[in-house]
Amino acid sequence: MLRAPACAAISALALLGALVSPTPSSAVPAASSPIAVAPAHTLAVTGPGVSLAPAYDPAIGRYAVRTTGAFTGSLTVSAGTDDPSGRVRVDGRPVSGGSTTLTGVEPGDEVSVIFDDAGGRAVHSLIVLPAAFPALNGTGPASGVAEGSLMLTMNSWNADPDRFHALVDDWGVPRWFRRMAMSSHDFRVQPSGSMTWSEPAPTREAANVIVEVDGRFREVARHKTIGLVNTDFHDSLLKSDGSMLLTAYEYDVPRIVTDSVFQEINPDGSVFHTWSTEDHVDRHAETVVDTDDPFARMDYSHLNAVTITPDGDYLASFRHLSSVFKIARTAHDGYAQGEIIWRLGGRLSDFEFVDDPYDGPCAQHTATMLPNGNVMVFDNGSMGSTQHPGFCVDSADPSGPTHARQVSRYVEWELDWDPELGAGTATMVRQYTGEDPGETDGAIFAPFTGSAFPLDNGNTLVGWGATGWAKPPGPAPSPIATELDGAGAKVWELTTPTRQGSYRVYREQVPDAFEPTVDLQVPAPGATYGYGEQVRADYGCTDVGGSSLQSCDGPTTSGALLPTTTPGTHTFEVVALDGDGNRTTQQRSYTVLSAPAPPAPPAPEPRADLAIKIGKDDWVGVGRYAPPSQAARALLELRGEVRGRLRLENTGTASQEFRIRARKGRFVHSSWYLQGKSQTPMIHRGRVHVRLEPGERVRLRFLIEATRRTEPGQRVPIRIVAKPRVGTETLDRVRLKLRVPGA
């Protein structure tokens, strides 16, 4: 992502969508005295094909920059604080003129906006999404909502290639996302602590593989069943001891069926147990699919979930049996390994359902046994058609016709199982169909996929699967996920106006494993600067991964002057820190040259400054020196006589003895007096010597008189020169020109 010069700004006041609100209470308070009113912030994003979601609120930390096909990779971030001493930085660089324009922006980039003012520090991040990413709208954090991010595999379940894995916060803003080229499912954190998803295998060795990734979503391993052909995508379990529980759909050519299989693999790679419906299910007696449809008949059981119960057995969900099985993982209590202990629902259900308006599961997904022995499932319900009435079993006639039920729900049953009788009751504890008290939205229907999982805080997370696929076209939102509290009330929800949905939804605390990036431009590597040279630092920082850039700091702020008044080698270090403590440090060394030696003081030197004054006129020649030609000149008329004064001053820095010489004027008579004594013969011969200290001066009086030889119209020049007795470089002179008026 490239940053335009800071001067490329537009008026923030003219931007649409900028909202003004108080600084969030989560901002770090300033160290100064408390302020009466927190500074107000503004934040907006503009540009071709971009919009900000949710709407700006200082309490919200992360935002999505949604784009359209008009997006060109350029966006303008306008941000400001009404604190005059406050500072706003975008990607670590100061905002100039209220806005910063970024170019070369790509989907997946994050833009950091940090406010520092009297209210403390407020941090925001803007993640740029591709145009195809579905709009997600969450109700936001709320009291009672569990911690963690939502793990989604957004898919439209048709030929649409726009498929994404994403970590999403409670506002529906992605922390991370990846576009998937093929249909991919079950993005989750495993009990082992690693993350996985399933995707089609690139070779014919398996139909699907379970891809294991590290904290930065880089592939570290691929897992598949052993000795089987078609590893399945629906479910997987990677345990902390290194063992795995994987699923497979195995096509049996002679029987023209697909058997559902799960396989547990030991940590050393050997097979612990392989279980198949071929050995344990009477497909003719148990399936709820249309046995007249050869394609439906092949997939007679459709395993979509398997896990290990708290008491150590397997719990498996079969959509096309509308039943959940508990299966002996090891031989115990008279059950052989792999033997079905009980069936919950379906044609051969071992339970009678009590207080359940829908009479047990129908085409369900996911099944979990809680520590108290209750079982929860995401119970899809079923579409119906003239060719096939649906997947729901009538408990009054379990072997008879099935029926449709276009209502999906999360449901939990309390089981009372009598092993001696091989029968029990399943009393419904709670269910949720999307019909909240006081709401009129009606029940939700997801004909396939979906999930229901218990959360650590006692809540339940419901993923609504393909409800968007089933809804009629239009702008009405479809639920992606709903979080319910312990009483079954909705406390949070994520929706989308698109028809996309997630195969399952998990809520997990996934740490940010991405280090921030530092962009240090100035000082350049190995740069050399002159002493006192004005050079401005230029650096910035960016971050991805969801925890947001918290700081981007150097010895001086970006745009401030580098220290260049101390000669030698200096280290300039920029440190970037994100919200999960990931830190990146970048250092540069630069050299400051030594200061130039100060010029040597001039040698002491005398200097003569001659000035002449006629009558009450001003002095002429003050501060004008010769050589070469700066001679002061006075021109006046000689009407009988001229009286004046001559002043000599030493304006130099050394004492000196000067000698003064005045040339005789032809046809006139001149007289010169120093301290009342005549110096006329001596000054004409240049023998008047005067020693002057710096700044000291002396004055001579003179009288110039016409003689009988003076004729009207004559011009009589008189030149006076003062110079040191030694040398001539500091001489000065004045010239007096007399004009005799005409007859």
Image (tube, helix red, strand yellow):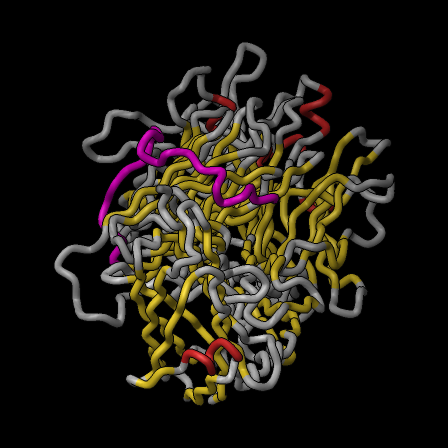
Can residue 297 be seen by looking at this rendering? yes
- Residue 605 in percent (x, y) is at 53, 83
Quick one: 472 or 622, which is closer to the camera? 622
309 displayed left or right of 457:
right
Quick one: 307 or 107, which is closer to the camera? 107
* Residue 94 lies in the magenta-colored region: no
- Residue 717 in percent (x, y) is at 48, 58
Q: Looking at this rendering, what residue extends furthest in the top direction? A: 386
Q: Residue at x 71, y 34 (%)?
A: 182
- Residue 660 in percent (x, y) is at 48, 78
- Residue 577 in percent (x, y) is at 50, 65
Please give the count of numbered marks on the rendered protein. 0
617 displayed left or right of 609:
left
Q: From what the image shows, is residue 678 above or below residue 591? A: below
Q: Looking at this rendering, what residue extends furthest in the front direction? A: 708
336 displayed left or right of 559:
right
Q: Residue at x 44, y 57 (%)?
A: 709
Quick one: 627 or 340, which is closer to the camera? 627
- Quadrant (top left/top right/bottom left/bottom right) for the C terminus: top left
Give the quarter of the image for residue 297. top right
Quick one: 121 or 350, which is closer to the camera? 121
Q: Which residues are magenta?
A: 1-27
Q: From what the image shows, is residue 7 above or below residue 656? A: above
Q: Residue at x 74, y 69 (%)?
A: 267
Q: Please, what is the dominant secondary structure of the magenta stretch? A: loop
Q: From what the image shows, is residue 559 above or below residue 653? A: above
Can residue 318 be seen by looking at this rendering? no
- Quadrant (top left/top right/bottom left/bottom right) for the N terminus: top right
Q: Residue at x 40, y 67 (%)?
A: 669
70 displayed left or right of 57:
right
* Residue 14 lies in the magenta-colored region: yes
Give the quarter of the image for residue 133. top right
